[in-house]
Amino acid sequence: MAASDMVYIGKSAKDEVLDPRLANRHGLITGATGTGKTVTLQVIAEGLSRLGVPVFCADVKGDLSGISQMGVPNPPLEARAQQIGLTDYKHEQFPIIFWDLFGEAGHPIRATVKSMGPLIVSRLLDVNDVQEGIINIVFRVAEDEKIPLVDLDDFRAMLNNVANRSDELAAKYGNVAKASVGAVQRQLLVLEQQGGGNFFGEPALDINDFMKLDSSGRGYINVLMADKLMQSPRLYAVFLFWLMTELFQKMPELGDPPKPKLCFFFDEAHLLFDQSPPPLMEKIEQVTRLIRSKGVGVYYVTQNPLDVPDTVSGQLGNRVQHALRAYSPKEQKAVRAAAQTFRPNPNIDTTRVIMELGVGEALVSMLEGKGTPEMVERTLIRPPSARVGAITEAERNAVLAASPLLGKYDQKAQGQKAADVLGGARGSAPVEATASRGGSWWGGGAPASAPGAPYGSQPAPGRTPYGGNRQSTAEVVEKAAVRAAVPFVFRILGQVFRSWLRG
């Protein structure tokens, strides 16, 4: 392939390029804070966009938004271009779509609770094994009974419904402990306080909107504004993994296309792997291994290559290693381990060079030929063509106003609710406050059925329409009258019996 058909990374003893035919073999960008990882990410994203490859990346510091603006004169960048012999260096801007989970700095991204599935929801809520079992039962019952699970209100209503029907459901689905249901509901409150409630709803994201080209054939760079989202690290990590899973499940098989359909950059990737339970780790490994055949390249960006487990790291063929600092024995061991991940170069002491690299330098090893990694080379990273750094609010608003998705996701849709199917919005009452009575202390809960009647039938006469065992006023009066009459009746019977004995 011609050099113009490659993504130019930088200059070593030769030109370091990323072959688009091998870009879906995944990659790893690592280095300490401030060593140039974000600029390297921008360089690769710009190069892929030029070749008509859409990109998705998370902007955790606000620095990547500058891709949307024309580059400005910058003496250090121009000096770097001259140093590496980049004669065709020019200022450019790239098509960009801003996304924001909270809908503040970009188009909102939404998903339904059902589409996330019990495994990802359990990780999002950080529950234990017993509570995860409850979540699996909730999903299964909702599927069997055709009850919608769209947002957190639906999920809460379904939790309460399953708890109130625990005896009925136990034989088919297993025991449902109301205390465990209450614990899950408390975790839902934590998630809502972190802003996770904004993520669930409709219209749900169409992943094809990530794969748009502009009128000149360049790929759109989808930037997730994640500076606020990073305040909730688990929500950030699970959300990005859900996006990867959606791509894996919904994209058709492509084999090895001449260029990827999409390249996905996962910044702060260590958050995905920290304390992840074994089932989730298996899912991450599976998605990373198989998504290549869907034409998607996944690039993990983190500080230390040891942040990525071996089962995943072994699948990352394209590697860029910026400087690491080693002030302690543990850090020195990490540097040696990082050096061992590269194909050795007899002319380079990789361990020593990792600690000597300056800002904008990196050790680079890309896949070549038939997919074999090249020998590691010390490389000067090329300068980006677009602006480096954050943009102003006015510039952001201009980009959003020109977005090809303007108006598609901006308003949240109001569809059928699980609470409506289950008998009203009050079906989402907390369970732990009502376990002794089966209903909510404020009257919540799903409608109660008459004794012996199937679930969902009309409440028995005299019962409250909100379900549970709460008594109506008529029942209270009736029972009080009975309690008052019983002693009187027994006194009369006693007098009759004593008179009979005397007679």
Image: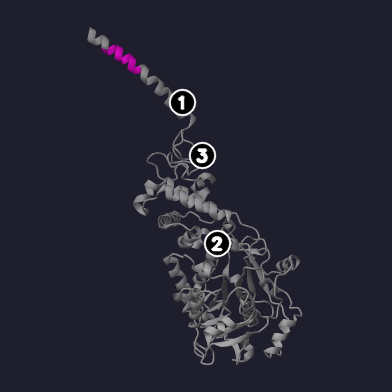
Q: Earlier in the sequence, mark 1 or mark 2?
A: 2
Q: Which residue is mark 1?
A: 477
**Residues rendered magenta in the picture:** 489-497
Residue at screen point 63% across, 65% down: 227
Q: Which mark is residue 443?
A: 3
Residue density around tag 2, few if under 14, some if 14–19, many if 20 or more, within 10 Å: many
**Residue 253 visible in the shown view:** no
311 left or right of 493?
right
Callout 1–callout 2 Cβ contact below 8 Å: no
Residue density around tag 1, few if under 14, some if 14–19, many if 20 or more, within 10 Å: few
Q: Earlier in the sequence, mark 3 or mark 1?
A: 3
Determine the secondary structure under disc 1. helix
381 left or right of 446?
right
Q: Which residue is mark 2?
A: 235
Nearer-the-camera pick, 294 or 237: 237
**Residue 407 visible in the shown view:** yes
Q: Amino acid at mark 2?
A: Leu
What percent of the width, then of the height, locates residue 242? 52, 66
Q: Earlier in the sequence, mark 2 or mark 3?
A: 2
